[in-house]
């Protein structure tokens, strides 16, 4: 349900940025790239913590 909410909010933000043409596209692209980079960083942190836990068990 939360994912659906995020999709709806993202669509609304996209519609708000649409009239700004080039500036809106740059802002939207920045938001998307920022979210992707943050997601990759979080995956890296999770992997690092799982590796540390695995070493402690062995």
Image (cartoon, rainbow, N blue to C red):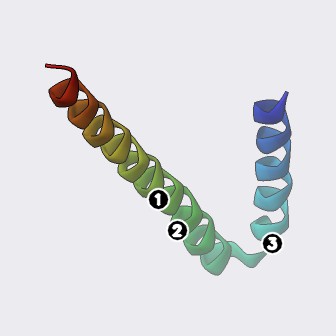
Percent across and percent down for residue 45 are 34, 47
User: Which circle marks residue 30 in the picture?
Assistant: 2
Q: Place residue 51 in its image quadrant.
A: top left
Give the farthest residue toward the front: 57
Point 81% across, 34% down: residue? 2
Q: How far apart are marks 2 and 1 (CA)?
A: 5 Å
Residue 23's x, y, as percent? 63, 80
Q: Which disc is residue 19 wearing?
A: 3
Left or right for 32, reference 54: right
Q: Which residue is located at x 22 percent, y 36 percent?
A: 52
Q: Do the residues labelled 2 and 1 touch (CB within 8 Å)?
A: yes
Residue 31 lies left or right of residue 5; in this view the side is: left
Task: Please give the name of the residue rendered at 15% of the width and 29% of the height, measured from the top-left corner.
Answer: 55
Q: What residue lies at 41% left-to-right and 56% top-to-bottom?
A: 37
Foreground residue, 8 or 42? 42
Check disc 2 and report its element: helix, strand or loop. helix
Q: Nearer the viewer, residue 49 or 20?
A: 49
The residue identified by callout 1 is 33
């Amino acid at each position: 349900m939360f994912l659906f909410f995020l999709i709806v909010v993202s669509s609304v933000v996209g519609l708000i940025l649409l009239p700004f043409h080039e500036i809106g596209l740059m802002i939207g692209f920045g938001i998307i790239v920022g979210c992707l980079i943050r997601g990759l960083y979080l995956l890296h942190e999770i992997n690092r913590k799982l590796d540390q836990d695995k070493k402690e068990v062995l």
